Image (cartoon, rainbow, N blue to C red):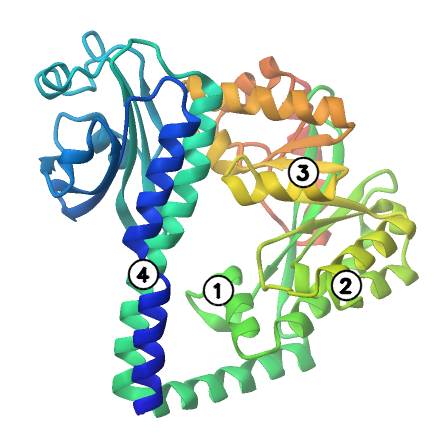
Amino acid sequence: MDEWFNLNASIRRAVDPLALMQRVADQALGALEGADEVLVGLVVDDGSLRYACAAGRASERVGEEIPLEDSLAGQALRERRTLLAGDTETDPRADREASPARGIRSMVSVPLIRPDGALGVLNAGSHRPDAFEPRDVVLLASMAEFVTAVVGAARDFSRVTARLSSDARGEGRRDAAARAWIEQIVTTRDFSLVFQPIFDLENGSMLAAEALVRFSAWGSKTPVAVIALAHRVGLGVDLEVAIAQAALAHLGELPQTALLSLNAGPAALASGGVTAALADVEAERVIVELTEQGRVDEHPQLARALRDLRAAGARLAIDDAGSGFASLMHILRLAPEVIKLDGELISSIDVDPVRRSLASSLLRFAAESGSLTIAERIETAAELQALRELGVRHGQGFHLARPVPASDLPRTLARAEAGLAA
């Protein structure tokens, strides 16, 4: 146990979240030409925010606590999306008193959000109105992803170390039980698959169907959580390969012109198991979506696996494009044949000019690089119309069709294709 406490202290000294956040603020100030100040604020309670670090003119505001009500930061946290105020004197979302007092005429506020709640905001301000361009907003949002990871990791680390310190042996027993459960799932294929159609938004035909796994025996645990647990106990690759094999077995049930899209993490791809499963099917009809599940340190193995994947005729897709810096770097490094626009980017795209601007940039990049684009999680008719106006050719989402078993696809397609063609 003494070794554990020594390790705990060493990690805390080596990875100081406050120092990392300050570095992000300093770099953001240098990267945003129009910015006079950059601040990172952390949520204190439901009604206030405290600035943890700052760069530029606002450096003296570190430690200041502000109310979230009637502020752009508070609005960004409530709406869970990036907000841009081109002129604080006319934008009702900005604090009409505080902003002029600090000489701030334009602002960008990026919420730091995790699935378990709001962490804070990353703000940039300028004394000039309309100082920030869409590319500045995209850059700040990418940096906010890193800040979210840093703050969230620091909080998780505190929680995990406290839990492990109090009951390390109990955690070991739970991991052993989890491993036994995952082994049973892999051995007996104790999961099911549903398929969500991906449509051509111009003529209503089905381009592909994405295979999605379901674990009915795990109650409220999401598929992502089950696969993450499998990786934690050392069986993530085995489970992902088993799911890919099961998905490929349904390829013959799809319309002959349709593609099958399946998900796999980098470790599963690097293992060669997914590529090996393609040997028994028409690989030209398969899209492999690279997910964030699992990690692989042997990058040459992943590169070799991707070469083998493409040599077999399959295509690579990058998921969650537009959700942050990591997905953009995947696109640049891996040159995928398919780019899937993240659902967070698509949500409210009909009323959010920042989302439309980012989507347009990704569409131009895809066109110039020869990649096909697919919009995910289209939930409303207004979002669908906005995407069509932007020139997005393919999409999927509950507004178009929900995931169904393979046997129900013909009936689902008939309804959805009729609605899209109307």
Tag 4, which secondary structure?
helix
> Looking at the image, is 232 positioned above or below residue 169?
above
Percent x, y for residue 196?
64, 45
First-in-chain label (1 vs 4) = 4
Asked if marks 1 and 4 touch (Cβ < 8 Å), the reply is: no
* Residue at mark 2 to residue at mark 3: CA–CA distance: 18 Å
- The residue that label 4 is drawn on is 154
- At horizontal 52% and vertical 60% (from top left) the residue drawn is 224
* Residue at mark 1 to residue at mark 3: CA–CA distance: 28 Å
- The residue that label 1 is drawn on is 225
Asked if marks 2 and 3 touch (Cβ < 8 Å), the reply is: no
* Residue at mark 2 to residue at mark 1: CA–CA distance: 25 Å
Q: Nearer the viewer, mark 1 or mark 3?
A: 3
Q: In this view of the protein, can residue 133 be seen by the observer? A: yes
Relative placement, left or right, of 374 versus 55 is right
Tell me which amino acid carries mark 2: Gln
- At horizontal 28% and vertical 10% (from top left) the residue drawn is 128
- The residue that label 2 is drawn on is 301
Percent x, y for residue 160?
32, 73
Percent x, y for residue 395?
64, 31
* Residue at mark 3 to residue at mark 4: CA–CA distance: 29 Å
First-in-chain label (2 vs 1) = 1
- The residue that label 3 is drawn on is 332
Tell me which amino acid carries mark 1: Ala
- At horizontal 69% and vertical 20% (from top left) the residue drawn is 421
